[in-house]
Amino acid sequence: MPRAYWVAHVDVRDPDAYARYRAANAAAFKKYGARFLVRGGAQEVREGASRARTVVIEFADLATARACYDSPEYQAARALRDPVSDADLVIVEGWAP
C-alpha cells in the first residue's frame, strides 16, 4: 500500500501564535504516526508561485493521512493556525511501483 503525504504551503503572519499551533499539532501527528520530511526549510521557487513555508508530512497510507486531518486533535490545532496564517494543503497518495 502506498504511503500518503500532506503537502502544505504556508504564509505565517504571527510567528508567536503559529508556534502555539505547532505545539498543538504534535498530539495528532504522534497519534497518526506522522513523519516530517520537510518542515519549513530553505526553498527556491523555480516555476509558478508558492508561499514562504513548505511542509511535507508522511503517513502510512491515504486513510491515515485523512484520519489525522479530520481528527479532533488536528482540528483543534488548526483553529489556532487559521487566524494567523494562510495555507494551501493537499493530501496526496504516493506512488508505489
Image (spheres, rainbow, N blue to C red):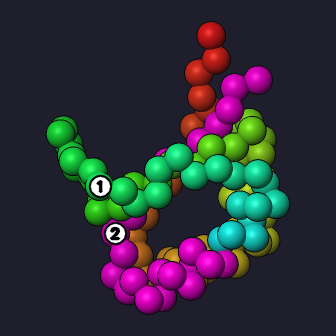
Q: Secondary structure at mark 2?
A: strand
Marks 2/1: CA–CA distance? 14 Å
Q: Is residue 11 magenta?
A: yes
User: Which of the pair 83/38 is nearer the observer?
Assistant: 38
The residue segment tinted magenta is: 1-24
Q: Position of residue 64 (x, y in %)?
A: 77, 45
Q: Amino acid at mark 2?
A: Asp
Q: Residue drawn 76% across and 23% down?
A: 1
Q: Residue at x 57, y 37 (%)?
A: 92
**Is mark 2 in CB contact (under 8 Å) with mark 1?**
no
The image shows residue 17 at horizontal and vertical percentages of 48, 88
In front of the other: 27 or 87: 27
* Residue 33 vertical position relative to residue 85 in the rendered view, above or below: above
Q: Amino acid at mark 1?
A: Ala
Q: Which residue is mark 1?
A: 42
Among all residues in the image, which is located at the extreme right?
31
The structure residue drawn at horizontal position 68% and vertical position 32%, both measured from the top left corner, is 3
Q: Which residue is mark 2?
A: 11
Q: Is residue 87 magenta?
A: no
For this rendering, which residue is in front, 50 or 22?
22
